[in-house]
Amino acid sequence: MALAIALVLIVVLAVGFHFVSPWWITPIASNWVRMDDTLTITIIITGALFIAINLFVVVALVRYRHRDGHRASYEPHNRRLEWWLIGITSVGVAALLAPGLFVYADYVRPPANALQMEVLGQQWQWRFRFAGAGGKLGTTDVKYISDDNPFGLNPADPNGRDNHLIDAPEVHLPLNRPIQVLTRSRDVLHDFYVPPFRARMNMVPGMITTFWFTPTKAGRYDILCAQLCGIGHSNMRGVVVVEDEAAFARWLAQQPTLEQRQQAKVQAASAGQASAGGNTQALADQGKTLAQAKGCVACHTVNGSPGVGPTWKGLYGSTQTMADGSTATADEAYLRAFIRDPKARVVKGFAPIMPNFDLSEQELSALVAYIKAQGGDAASTAAKP
């Protein structure tokens, strides 16, 4: 009897916890109420089976409990019971699968007026792309990927010339407008996930995956990677800002196009020289922003505390011992070479897990300037009059 009472209490507490827990009344920021409805159907069906099976066990425990003079009967086969179980199970499985198939078919089939947004994932950062005035996204290919073209845009495709490129972890979206998300990965499996949107999609290397949603509530929402993608996975974060159409249009107009980025490339050399002429702090500030956007802070600290990679505090000008026993001075040439090809030499005590980053010359100069700003023998010497 004790076991029967325990099972009844488990059923009551489990069902009660479902109704008092807050997860199922979380505010929704997208149109995917149907996805929540599908989850509700699943919970109702599995919940009903959970209750029925446990109560059946309770009845069996009470009715067929051990009593003097009663013996269990042996019944090796019961066709009627088997057919009932097959029928009920088949209906239950179909009821679980069918709604999900219909919802998923709609989930990957956007409406005609949807705004296209491409999401590019890479350890451990997010990039985004929108069509420009022409209304079309340019074609891409991995063979075109370079430091100055991380999206791999086809330079011969005129549709890509006016595409807006967001090389930062923050993206804006218009309120109450369908958004088609096209996802790509440059290295490993990622997953673009904004929890309040009730929408997510795996980002598979070598293919484009897609889904759509409609933001229905203004605000700032965290972007997470929902697939374990490496040591910096937990820091692969971003922000989606949902705002009215006018504010979104103003933000998008401020984002550089491919053509504007190419023009900026021409000015990169002079910008790098400007750092030696009194603009060092501005370049270091740019490097700080870049380190956060690229996910460098996931492995490298700036306060001297241990991390996955060497701390940047006091790194510049210090002597680093390599895994092969050789030593090297962490001067500017060392930092540039290490960032460009992190696996060419391995620092003793650290694993060779740093990925290759596509950085322009300007970005590389900014990142080195930020590392210099964290102190070190050479930095102190350079700061003396």
Image: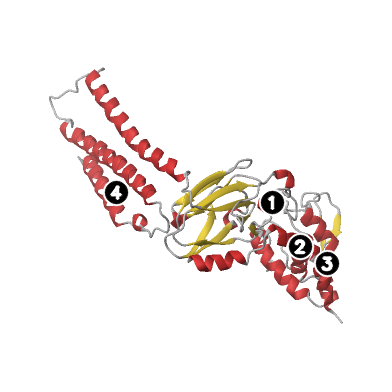
Location of mark 4 (residue)? 14
Q: Distance between the residues labelled 3 and 2?
A: 34 Å
Q: Which amino acid does label 3 sit on?
A: Gly
Q: Which of marks 4 and 1 is nearer the N terminus?
A: 4
- Dividing the picture into quadrants, the one containing residue 62 is top left
Location of mark 1 (residue)? 158
Which mark identifies residue 331? none
Secondary structure of residue under mark 1: helix
Secondary structure of residue under mark 4: helix
Q: What residue type is labelled 2?
A: Gln
Location of mark 2 (residue)? 263
Up-down: is 296 above or below 91?
below
Q: Distance between the residues labelled 3 and 1?
A: 46 Å
Q: Which amino acid does label 4 sit on?
A: Ala
Q: Which of marks 3 and 2 is nearer the N terminus?
A: 2
Location of mark 3 (residue)? 317
